[in-house]
Amino acid sequence: MTMPAVTMEIGVALRPSGAGTAFGEPPRRLRCCDASACRNAGGIALRQALLAARAAAGLGEDTLAIRAVGCLRLCGRGPLVAADGPAGSRLWGGVPPPLAEPLLAAALEAAEADPLAPFSLDLNHPFFRLQKPVVLERCGLVDPDSLDDALAQGAYAQLRRCVQHLKPEEVRAEVRRSGLRGRGGAGYPTGLKWDTVALQPSGPRQVVANGDEGDPGAFMDRTVLESDPHRLLEGLAIAAWAVEALNGYLYVRAEYPLAIARLQRALEQVEAWGGFGPALCGTPGPCGSSCGWGPAPTCAARKRP
Ligand SMILES: Cc1cc2nc3c(=O)[nH]c(=O)nc-3n(C[C@H](O)[C@H](O)[C@H](O)COP(=O)(O)O)c2cc1C
Ligand code: FES
C-alpha cells in the first residue's frame, strides 16, 4: 500500500512524551465529554449549543477550541465539560444546553458565571486530586476520533521505541521487571503470559485483546475503547512485537456500539498510515528482519452477534 505523503511527517508532529494538548491549540479550549454516559445525559446537545453560542458571538476555533473528548471521570454527573485556559482548568457537570452562553463566557473568563455555580465541580476534591491516571492518562484530553491528536499526545511513541530499539525478549524482560499485571480480573503477570507465548515452538502466533466485561457497572474496558482507542491498538502491537505474532484480534461486546465505532475508525486510520509499518513504527531496528515482524499485523474488531 502506498502511504500518504503526510505520514512521512510523523516524527515532526510528535510530542516528546506523555499527554497534553495537541500542537497548535489555542490557549483556551473546552473539552466536552463524548463518551457513553455523557452522551446519554445530553452531551451532544450541549456541545452543539456551545458551538452555536460561539458562532453567535462571532468567535471561532482560534479563540476557543471546542473539542469532543472521552471520559472526564465523573460519569454520574454528566454531561461533563472542562475548560482550559491560562488560569488553569475548570470542570462543570450537568450544565443544561440553555446555559451554553454563560458557559462560553466562563471559558473565556469574560464574565462571572453565577448561573453555573451549581454545576461547578471541584478539581481539587480528593476524588480527582488523588488519582494518577496511567492507562487513562489521555482520556478526556485526546480526541478519540483523531489519530493526529493521539500522535500529538504521544501515541505510538512506545511502539516505535520497541520496534526500533528493543528485541522482543528485551520488551518482555522490561514488562516482567515492571510488574505489570493483567487488568482482566486475575491480575496475571503480563510478562509471564507473554513469555509463555513467545517460548512456544515457532508457528503462527496471534494476539487477542479481550474487550468484554461482564461485571455489572465495570466499564474499564469501555472507557479505554471509547476514550483512547489508539492506546489499545498500541498495546496490542507491542504485545505482538514482544511475542513475535503477526496478527492481532480485538473482541468487543455488541453492547458497546460507540466503542466499536471508535475502534473501527482507529483501525481505519492505522491502515491509512500503512498499518504498523514504517510510518507508525519507524524503520525497523536490529530485530527487523530476524524476529518475524513482517507486514503490519492485522486487527479485527469483532462483536457478539
Ligand atoms: C475475576 C475475573 C473476571 C473476569 N471477567 C471477565 C468478563 O467479564 N468477561 C470476559 O470476557 N472475561 C472475563 N475474565 C477473563 C479474562 O478476561 C481473561 O482471563 C483474560 O485473558 C485476562 O487477561 P489479562 O491477563 O490481560 O488480565 C475474567 C477473569 C477473572 C479472573
Ligand atoms: S462518560 Fe463523561 S465523564 Fe465519563
Image (cartoon, rainbow, N blue to C red):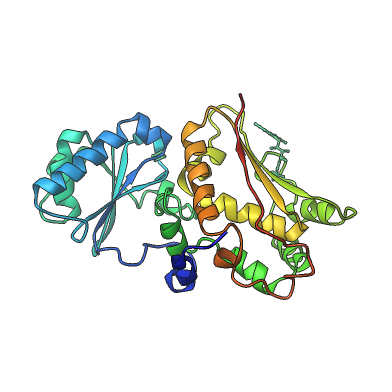
Q: Residue 65: which quarter of the image?
A: bottom left
Task: Relative to 98, say whether 239 is above or below.
Answer: below
Q: How many marks?
A: 0
Write the residue at 72% across / 65% down. Answer: 171
Q: Is residue 124 left or right of residue 284?
A: left
- Residue 266, how many percent across, how many down? 50, 48
Of residues 165 and 8, the one nearer the viewer is 8
Task: Relative to 268, say whether 293 is above or below.
Answer: below
In the image, ligand 2 is in what quadrant? top left
Q: Is residue 242 left or right of residue 71?
A: right
- Residue 107, how many percent across, how many down? 20, 53
Write the residue at 68% across / 59% down. Answer: 295
Q: Where's the C terminus, which quadrant? A: top right
- Residue 21, how many percent across, how many down? 36, 62
Q: Is residue 138 left or right of residue 66?
A: right
Visible in this render: residue 116? Answer: no
Task: Relative to 79, say whether 155 is above or below.
Answer: below
- Residue 111, how many percent across, how many down? 10, 52
- Residue furthest to the top in view is 305
Q: Residue 95: which quarter of the image?
A: top left
Write the residue at 29% across / 45% down. Answer: 81
- Residue furthest to the right in view is 201
Q: Where's the N terminus, which quadrant? A: bottom right
Visible in this render: residue 193? Answer: yes
